[in-house]
Image (cartoon, rainbow, N blue to C red):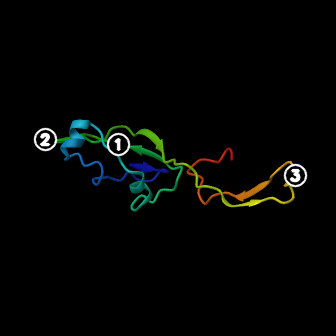
Amino acid sequence: MQAGGSVFTEDKADCDGASSSVILAAGCKVPISSLLAAPYNLPWGSSIYAKVTAINVVGSSLASNAGNGAVILTSPDPPQNLANNAVVTNKDTIGFSWQDGNANGGTPVIDY
């Protein structure tokens, strides 16, 4: 797998081609937690590309072209410090103020 133009890294923990389930499925799943941890240490919003190599008793194929370009996204963290905005609050209206959450999940927050 690759992110942000870095070198491709083999992921045998989640996508070991010796696994019969990976062979039967002709695919595998990489948990987001693996991509956020070492050796990848990718931030939210990173694009992910993968290459696959076929292996048999004779040897290994060349790697496939990079594919997918998936992006690591999740829901944003909730806003923090929700409070009454006394400047706006009156008998007809209640005003609120808050700060953005710590992480936007990899894409800008577009609404509250």
Between label 2 and label 1, give the one nearer the viewer.
1
Vertical side of 78 occupied by 63: above or below: above
Examine the rendered structure and indicate whether residue 110 appears above or below residue 85.
above
Three-letter amino acid code of the residue under disc 2 = Val
Secondary element at image label 1: loop
Q: Is residue 106 left or right of residue 24?
A: right
Disc 3 target residue: 91
| Element assignment for label 2 | loop
Residue 92 location in percent, x, y?
A: 86, 48
Q: Identify the image quadrant of residue 77.
A: bottom right
Q: Is residue 69 visible?
A: yes
Farthest left residue in view: 57
Residue 98: quadrant of the picture: bottom right
Is residue 60 in view? no
The earlier-in-sequence mark between 2 and 3 is 2
Contact between labelled residues 1 and 2, with CB atoms less than 8 Å apart:
no
Taking depth in this image into account, of 30 and 64 the one nearest to the observer is: 30
Residue occupying the point 32% across, 52% down = 10
The amino acid type, in three-letter code, at marker 1 is Lys
Query: What's under tag 3, amino acid-wise?
Result: Lys
Circle 1 crowding by C-alpha within 10 Å: few under 14, some 14–19, many from 20: some
The mark closer to the camera, 2 or 3, is 3
Tell me how far mark 2 sits from mark 3, CA to CA: 80 Å
For residue 51, which numbered disc appears in the image?
1
Residue under circle 2?
Answer: 58
Residue drawn where x is 40% and y is 62% of the image: 38
